[in-house]
Structure formats: C-alpha cells, structure tokens
Image (cartoon, helix red, strand yellow):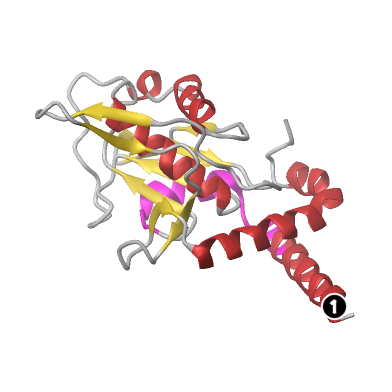
Amino acid sequence: MFGNQRKNQVFVGTLLTWMTRLTHSDPDDILQSLVDRPRETINIELKSWIDPKSPEGEQKIARPALALRNQNGGYLVIGFNDKTCKPDPVPAGVNVRLKYHADEIQRIVTRYASHPFFIEAHFPETEGVEYPVIRIPPGFKTPVVCKADLLVKAPDGKERFLLRAKDIHVRTVDANHAISSAPGNGRDIEELVERCFQNRELGPYRPSFENLSGNPKR
C-alpha cells in the first residue's frame, strides 16, 4: 500500500516538474543563458576547450555526457573555466562548428555508452564568440554504463585509465565536495535508480511533452 502511494507521489511530482519546465522555458533562451551566464549545476557542466580527437578530450566529453544522461539530461558547455565560470580564449585557428560537430561528439558518446543516446550540438554566441553547447536529452529508463576502457601510456611507459568499463558515471558532490562527473557511490546509484523509475512512470506522457518543448522524440 505504502509502496504504491510512494510511487504515485513520485509520478505526480515528476509530471508537475515537466509541465512547469515546458510552460516557462524556451529552448533558445536556455541555450543563450548558458553562455551569457555560465555556471556549474547538477545538470550543467563547464569544460575548457577540448580536443575531441585526443584521448583526454574523449574522456572530457564522454564522462560528463554519460553522467548527465544518468542525471536525466543536461548540458555540457565548452569554452569556460569550471572554477571561475569565465570564458577561456579560443585556441588559434579553431573552427568551432567543425571541431565540435554533432557527428564527432556522437561518435564519442556512442563508443562509451552502454545504451547509446542522441545528442545535440548547439553554438550560441556571446561577445562575438560561438561556444559549443552539447545537449544531453532526458528520458533514460536504464542506467547508462561506460562500456569500454580508455587507456593512455604515461611517460614512464605505464598505462593509466582515463575511463573504465563498467563504471556508472553520475553528477555528484561526493567525489571532491563540489559538483562533478564521477563514478557513483551507493547513494548516487540509489538516486539514479529512482530517476529511472520516474521516467518509466512518465513514459506514456513523454512524447507529447517533448513535442511541446520543441525537442521532438527521434
């Protein structure tokens, strides 16, 4: 009895949250605000400029993408210092739209996500500079696990892991007492399972919600 009551409370709460978001948020306004007022939150991660072709770049894209998916969606904003939230200088000669093309980001995400999901690449502009904003969609029903190792060889010849297969990355404050993307602990995983349950309960309503939000289901 109490279990069903709890499920109903969670479902109603999630339903009301979605309705509030969709009626008060414009997708373009949200994207613009991410570069006009950059900040780190549980659903927003800032990264300095990344080379997606390098192993370190793959890690810095894959880990937050998986963590944000497990957080039920969010945004990876590239080109900002995650400590100061200030813009970093754009590397010389970089074609931002080409270097961070959706196909390139999708390739990385699909390589490491146990349950592949579509991403979107947007390029809002502020002060004459375009910044890549990678949107990770909500709606997952099963935890996304890292499915492949990523190793690099150190100068001493030893290999070290940048990503480990079977890790479940989440957005957490427990790893270093600040919001970050990291492998989850017991409490993180418990909350992750609860989010999966919420999305399963919301499932029949999601297509109409996504159409209203301007992000139709693929």
Q: Quadrant of residue 145?
A: top right
Q: Nearer the viewer, residue 134 or 126?
A: 134
Report the span colored magenta: 20-40
User: At 52% across and 68% down in the image, what residue appears?
Assistant: 187
**Majority secondary structure of the magenta segment?**
helix
Q: Is 198 displayed left or right of 187 in the figure?
A: right
For label 1, the residue is 5
Q: Is residue 105 visible?
A: yes
Q: Is residue 146 above or below residue 5?
A: above
- Image point (81%, 70%), residue name: 7
Name of the residue lying farthest toward the front: 158
Looking at the image, which residue is at 37% across and 50% down?
A: 36
Which element type, helix, strand or loop, lies under badge 1? Answer: helix
Q: What is the crowding at mark 1: few (fewer than 14 residues within 10 Å), some, or many (at least 20)?
A: few
Type of the residue with mark 1: Gln
Residue at the right extreme, as displayed: 1
Residue drawn 35% across and 48% down? Answer: 46
User: How many numbered circles does the render carry?
Assistant: 1
